[in-house]
Amino acid sequence: MRLPRPAAFLAFALAACSTSEEPPEELVVAPILTSAEAQDEFTWAKPTEARVVHVSLDLGLDFEAQQVGGTATLDIAAADGAREIVLDSNGLEVSSVTDGEGDPLEFDMGDNPDGDEKGEPFTIHFAAEDGVVTAPEQVVITYKSAPGAEALQWLSPEQTAGKEHPFLFSQGQAILNRSWIPTQDSPGIRQSWDARIAAPAALGVVMSGIRRGDPASGPDGTKIYTFEMEHSVPPYLISIAAGDIAFAQLGARTGVWAEPSVLQAAKDELGDTEAMIDAAEELYGPYRWGRYDMIVLPPSFPYGGMENPVMTFLTPTFIAGDRSNTGLVAHELAHSWSGNLVTYASWRDGWLNEGVTSYIESRITEQVFGKVRAEQEYALSYAALAEMVDEMGQGNPVTAMRTPPGTSPFDTASEAIYDKGTVFLRTVENIVGRERFDPWLRSWFDNHAFQPATSEMFLDDMRENLIKDDEELENELMLDEWVYGTGLPSNALKPDPEAFAAVDAAVAAYADSRDLTEIETEWPEWSAAEQRRFLERLPEELSPSELGALDNTLGLSDTRNAEVQFLWLDAALRNRYEPVVPQAEEFLTRVGRNKFVSPLFAVLMAQDEWGQDIAKALYAKTRGGYHSMTRGNVDNIVGWTE
Ligand SMILES: [Zn+2]
């Protein structure tokens, strides 16, 4: 069922006002923010002239050609006098555009002088009748994605666990969805959507919307799936995955999809999901999206997770057998409030999604796994931030939470966005107290639900509803320095020194003695975070015999935890430890998660010919298996030229 939509003029009136006295829970058409702070440099759209309010996709998946194709019907709202609507495209092959009645409309694909990921402006010209240009209520675009569309990764059967069927998944964030959906691809232009997808009958399809009914039989041995997202969402959240997938129920409103051979391990690992939702709801109000399902993708997925609504996408590398990496799930779930419910209007406010989410993740972790684990994770965040500020300099613009103009959304420092955001909110929480901070943060989500937001709005709301003219408190919080300044503000809440006291003492002792006798007994008792801390703090230089002893004593090569394995490979490769090379090659061939792949290639390239030769020969073999996002990074690291 689709929600009734207001007439175009009303939609535009709503679009023009950025705040209202009592915002309703959801405006059917979310406002377009017009402040300078809300401007998105990475869209061609001019949403105050004409904007998309709903996207309706009718697409077929062509695994042979590696293209999706069909129609996109866009409901639009236009201001009086608008003569065109400008969409974003990245390589879309458009064959025709009509209005909702089927009358053809003229369109043109413009140029992008920079030839970068912003893609091309796709302008649809409104028709004139008796000399008067009138905006249609709908435009219908018939098109195909280009082969190699950056949002889509088409996997051969060999790249899946089952090895029998191909697999497709999309990754829209940041500005990749314009390579398969012709719309205004900007986070401040929220759109509801629905889709009808024809896929080969052997494959299952999921999307980031609620599935309507069972799949129907289509022509040529296809199955037709229908999905709907009735809430308006930033368009980077429209996503799809298709493959040989099966489903397991976790709780009343939660479940997991995965390839059949991965399903049981995924289900076991995700057993805390309902408890996580309960914890988040208790703090920040109801989960408003209906179901919360997840799909565990093949290992080439470039991220840890992606918070696609009602269907979080996950890397299989979080599965460790002991739920030690499920902070990732807490993180993606937290985005159901920060990021998906309230979303940054421009990419420069990345912290509003990721920093706030990392903070909520830590609150969920505390609730579900206890304070010790939460404090350890905070200590890791704080250390990452402090190290980055140390390295880059207190005044360096890359350390700012609100990123400098022109910063590509693919090019932000996670320490400045995720870690600094967490440390900021923990600092505020610590100063004002949870009994005041928690209800305020909840009210922020309630008051801006399904709407775009900016840093300025966040601070205004905090001042109005939390600080309430308390000048002393205002000075103590240093809000502007946190959000707009660089470096680490002086009031930052330090982590609990006890968080890693035992591990830090052990690793310091090891650095002196290179003796593992005591660590051997402690290691199995340590949490995954403690094991990671130990490996992260190992001496830079280790001899082959020391590396051999670490591996044999701690069983590093046999770990099921990809985070631990990554740190082990990093330590071994930076010391040119030959015996680890086959393991590194296997890992980098199987896994495409950028967090692991880019640093390991960087560590090889930082060596002499030994590492550089390994990196170049290996990358020539693995490059085709990586997602475009990972590929883009590693291309730079190894100096790849086609
Ligand atoms: Zn996130």
Image (cartoon, rainbow, N blue to C red):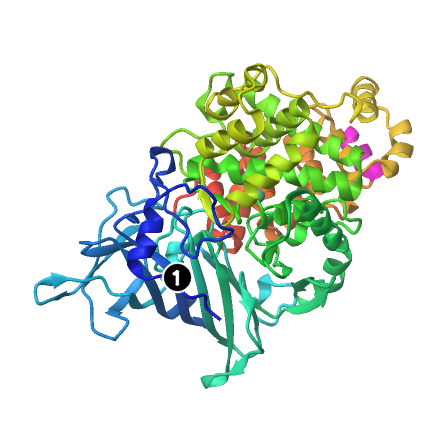
Q: Let me know if residue 375 appears in the view.
A: yes
Q: Nearer the viewer, residue 193 or 472?
A: 472
- Give the residue pinned by disc 1: 54
**Residue located at (78% from left, 20% from top):** 511
**Disc 1 element:** strand
Quadrant containing ligand 1 reads top right
**Residue located at (78% from left, 58% from top):** 268
In percent of width and height, residue 20 lies at 42, 42
- Residue 551 in the magenta stretch? The answer is yes
By secondary structure, the bulk of the magenta-drawn segment is best described as helix
Q: Which of 275 and 571 is in front in this view?
A: 275
**Residue located at (46% from left, 34% from top):** 457
Q: The disc labelled 1 sits on which kind of residue?
A: His
Q: Which of 23 and 525 is in front in this view?
A: 23
In percent of width and height, residue 356 lies at 58, 37
Q: In this view, does 427 lie to the left or right of 125?
A: right
Which quadrant holds residue 537?
Answer: top right
Q: Is residue 360 left or right of residue 65?
A: right
Height in image: 50 above or below 385?
Answer: below
Q: Which stretch is magenta?
A: 544-554
Q: Is the residue at mark 1 in contact range of ligand 1, meaning its CB lies under 8 Å from it?
A: no
Q: Is residue 622 left or right of residue 271?
A: left
